[in-house]
Amino acid sequence: CQAYDPDSMRGVLDALPAVSASNPKPLLVTEFGASAKLEVPGQDPVYNERHQADVLEGLWGLIEDNDAVTVGGCIMEWVDEWWKGNNFPDFAHDNCPDPRPDIQSDCGVRLSNNTFIHEEWLGLNSQSLPASTISNTEYCITARQAYERIRSIWTGTGGAPPGTRVVATRCGKSPL
């Protein structure tokens, strides 16, 4: 099962009681996520870490609320995936599909419920090239609010209050 917004997750989970009556095996949500880019109809996409954290917290809450039939879930994605802009027939945004995997784009895909998902922006961590480098052999990842929110939920530590900017940047040579 995959889910990128509360409506699609609710649709899947609402169907589970009927399915579990004939199949007692639990459901693992193999992919759920939220983009750090927020699509507002008629406007350019905007970067919104808090929205991403709120959606992920809501999706995890739906999984927990249905623990009679679910065994958990896997968040999509650990770090942004810049190369995905070339994978979608996106006609809603300029310069899409994006043939450059070294630049993060607004390319994405419209879901069936009219939600637009920016696949390049699903990371709990953002990815960037430091200004001091002119090659793509060094990269940095920075934890987003969503990372801190999920970490605090899963560890029970309370974490930073909503809206707090978490700055935990690590830079280093690419292993490739």
Image (tube, helix red, strand yellow):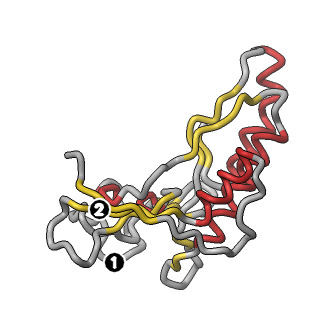
- x and y, in percent, of residue 18 in the image: 82, 26
Give me the residue at 68% from left, 60% from top: 55
- x and y, in percent, of residue 126 in the image: 44, 64
Helix, strand or loop at mark 1: loop
* Mark 1 and mark 2: Cα distance apart in space: 26 Å
- x and y, in percent, of residue 119 in the image: 45, 58
Q: Which residue is mark 2?
A: 139
Residue in front for this viewpoint, 71 or 154? 154
Residue 97 horizontal side relative to residue 49, left or right: left
Q: Which residue is mark 1?
A: 94
Q: What is the three-letter code of the residue carrying label 1?
A: Asp
Residue 106 horizontal side relative to residue 61, left or right: left
In the figure, 59 relative to 44: above or below?
above
Residue in front for this viewpoint, 18 or 73? 73
Check disc 2: other Cα within 10 Å, few if <14, some if 14-19, many if 20+. some
Residue in front for this viewpoint, 44 or 111? 44
Furthest residue in direction left, as rendered: 135
In front: mark 1 or mark 2?
2
Give me the residue at 81% from left, 32% from top: 67
Give me the residue at 65% from left, 30% from top: 28
Q: What is the three-letter code of the residue carrying label 2?
A: Tyr
In the figure, 73 relative to 98: above or below?
above
Residue in front for this viewpoint, 83 or 94? 83
